[in-house]
Amino acid sequence: MNHKIMYQEFFKAFENVENLGGKAWEHAIAIDLLNNSNIKDCSIHCFHYQQMFECFFKHILETKSKFGAYSKSHKLNNLLEELIAATVFKTNKSKYRSDLTVITVCAEEYRYNFDIDCQGYLESVAVCNELIKELIEFEKE
């Protein structure tokens, strides 16, 4: 699973920050380590990718929403909906809906089973990386 993207670069602004943005950076480091290892099982990658996304969604909701809070949901789709409703962030959510669901389901599978569709998962990651870029730009504003 050798990928060119360095997630720690996406989240560089949160390096060792003691909040959910910092937790997203920590998961980004784990993903980069996994990407440069010989581990063939992509479920551990998915676990950290979902956690990175969830922490970052919740960081933005905590810092940029009108409520300064977030739900307890672990479903990335729900968190995107919440983000759109509670902040000025706008995106084509239908572009990401199925891929965010794939990542959420894969992360849930990690907890119980190691048999996930790695190719399908990695295709979803490629789509969701675009959303990460959008969120990073929004967070900087």
Image (cartoon, rainbow, N blue to C red):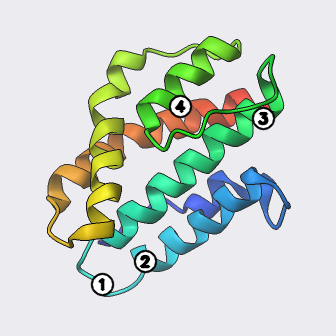
* Lower sequence index among marks 2 and 4: 2
The image position of residue 116, as x and y in percent, is: 17, 62
Instruction: Tell me the element at label 2.
Output: helix
Tell me, yes or no, whether the two marked residues, 1 and 4, touch with CB atoms within 8 Å.
no
Residue linked to disc 1: 39
Q: Nearer the viewer, residue 35 or 93?
A: 93
Q: Is residue 12 above or below residue 129?
A: below
Residue drawn at (54%, 73%) of the image: 30
Q: What kind of residue is marked 4?
A: Leu
Location of the C terminus (image quadrant): top right
Q: Earlier in the sequence, mark 1 or mark 3?
A: 1
C-alpha distance separating marks 2 and 4? 25 Å
Instruction: Say whether disc 1 or disc 4 marks the residue closer to the N-terminus.
Output: 1
Measured as percent of width and height from the top left, residue 24 is found at: 65, 56
**Badge 1 density bin: few <14, some 14–19, many ≥20, Cα 10 Å:** few
Depth check, mark 1 against mark 4: the one in front is: 4
Q: Residue furthest front?
A: 72
The residue tagged 2 is 34
**Could you tell me if residue 141 is visible in this image?**
no
The answer to whether the residue labelled 1 contacts the one labelled 3, judged by CB atoms less than 8 Å apart, is no
Which label sits on residue 131? Answer: none
Task: Identify the mark at residue 62; answer none if there is no mark.
Answer: 3
> What's the mark number on residue 79?
4
Q: Position of residue 86 (x, y in %)?
A: 68, 16
Neighbourhood count class around disc 4 (C-alpha, 10 Å): few under 14, some 14–19, many 20 upward: many
Element under label 3? Answer: helix
Which of marks 2 and 1 precedes in the sequence?
2
Element under label 1? Answer: loop
